[in-house]
Image: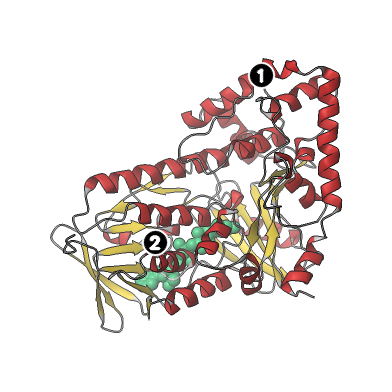
Amino acid sequence: MTTDNRIQDLVIVGGGTAGWMAAASLQQHFAGTPLKITLVESPQIGTVGVGEATTPTIRRFYQQLGLDDLQVMRAVGGTCKLGIQFNHWRQPGHSFFHPFSVFGQDLDGVAFHHYWLRAREIGLDVPITDFSLGASLALDGRFSPPSPRPPSTLSVYDWALHLDAGRFAELLRDIAVERGVTHLRDTIVDVRQGENGFIRSLQLASGAEICGDLFIDCSGFNGLLIEKTLNTGFEDWGHWLLCDSAWVAQTERGGEPAPYTKVDAHCAGWRWRIPLQHRDGNGHVFSSRYRDKDQARKEFVDSLESAPTAEPRLLRFLPGRRKQAWNRNVIALGLAAGFLEPLESTSIAMIETGIARIKQLFPDRSFAPEIIDEFNEDTRLEYERVRDFLILHYALNRRQDSDFWRDCRQMWLNGDLPQTLQKKMALFKLRGHLIRYRWEMFQPASWLAIYAGFGLLPQSCDPAAERLSGKKLVESLRAMRAGVQQAVQQAPAHGEFLARYCGTA
Ligand code: FAD
């Protein structure tokens, strides 16, 4: 096999979460090959420093690097996350939970939620989360890792981590550097391109020049290579996702850490609370079109359980994605590729899938357009699927207390949502159909959690669910619920789990 055309030098720009995830993972993947990986990060330009709630795929990501859960949790001050509690979203005072789990057990080939819907019709009106062990553990403040051999789907749940973003990047940096990544602390001051527009080299403040065949742009919101240099363009989704700003602050650890992320709806946005072992992360995401930043800051600070440990920081963002995640010899990852608000903690998960795609479609120096198109198409689809899922959370609200929430719902009622989402919602409303598209990050169970949480229920359910008599149906559901409750009682409190395995006080 000829090696002439192989990529020899891969340069990663940026040492935030995206840069170090890419460096550690690609170094591991290409170990033993001639590929050289260099990461350059500016000591002057900081990282965004947020990104502390994750989805369960993060665990698969670090496990592939040879790290185990407890090792990572100790290193990053991590706590366990079984899902997200949504408070006041449907309407003030209302609460629901989106777990990382399926609900109940399918019976005779009919999906569980059809039985649940039918049971409601005949009088057994219990929240669907009662049939999720993950949700039930979380809401009882308990945690125990799922059984590797669950006896039935009733015991199937997954979990993720709340982590200190800075410490996570450091952990990955140490692994990447130890395994052979060259690390440069320098600021890129100029970018040199060849005649075809491909990036040839990066000029550094120290006077050094780094050449590369392939560049991964992890430089954050600015997109130093993908946008500032290549002018790739940005698809702005601000007309669907109205939030564009966030106040963020840390507070001291207060009380028992919840094994889930809390997100509370506010007048023109929402607020998160992420418990770590050593502190809490807080943020208030809001729409600057509906809320003045100082007013939002005051609401945020007033809502904190204790005084922030430092002045709250304001971050501005544009919801949307880069028109091409891969342009010429530059692939954007992380904030350089796009941003969707952190309501479902999807950014780090999209870094993981971006890295997986890079491995799968790794080019040679001919940069075949078919490969680039495939990468861009898959990335586009994934971003659009996440976008739709996030919009759903706003469209279904029934709050009447501000223009922000009324306008969000009106978008749906006016038929102004993306067609892909309108179609999905219509199919669910008709007969509880849960459709999963290609490159969809969220499973049908997640869509169900949001539909049910907001009280959007179908007009009818699968007629096959009538195969079970009403009496048998109620008995089966009661037995499932009792099984979940029994399992919950056997699990330790989340704080106790952390103390036992992570040595927290
Ligand atoms: P950054 O962290 O901004 O890093 C950029 C890097 O580029 C830095 O190292 C910088 O030094 C370097 N750089 C820039 N310019 C130059 C230059 N000229 N020369 C050299 N180096 C340069 N994600 C989640 O998954 N969960 C969450 O809960 C979550 N919450 C979020 C909340 C908010 C308000 C925001 C804004 C984001 C959140 N995210 C979350 C997203 C998450 O923070 C990012 O996806 C993640 O941190 C990756 O950032 P990054 O590495 O792309 O960019």
- Compared to residue 426, the image places residue 380 above or below, namely below
Front position in the image: 229 or 166 = 166
Q: Residues within 10 Å of mark 2 (few under 14, many from 20)?
A: some
Camera sees residue 299 = yes
Residue 182 lies, with reference to residue 494, above or below; the image says below
The local crowd at label 1, few if under 14, some if 14 to 19, many if 20 or more residues have their Cα within 10 Å, is some
Q: Secondary structure at mark 2?
A: loop
Residue 288 versus residue 204 in the image, above or below = above
Colouring rule applied to residues:
secondary structure
Residue 200 position in % (x across, y down): 20, 67
The location of residue 305, given as percent across then percent down, is: 78, 63
Ligand 1 contact, mark 1 (Cβ < 8 Å): no
Q: Nearer the viewer, residue 87 or 288?
A: 87
Nearest to N terminus: mark 1 or mark 2? 2
Q: Which residue is mark 2?
A: 222
Q: Residue at x 30, y 69 (%)?
A: 33
The answer to which quarter of the image holds residue 1 is: bottom left
Asked if one can make out residue 274 in the rendered structure from this viewpoint, the answer is: no
**Residue appearing at x 18%, y 61% in the figure:** 5
Q: Is residue 127 left or right of residue 71?
A: right
Image spot of residue 13 (x, y percent): 36, 68
Asked whether 73 or 64 is in front, the reply is 64
Which residue lies at the image location 78% right of the left edge and 71% below the top edge? 499
The residue carrying mark 1 is 462
Asked whether mark 2 and ligand 1 are closer than 8 Å, the reply comes as yes
Q: Secondary structure at mark 1?
A: loop
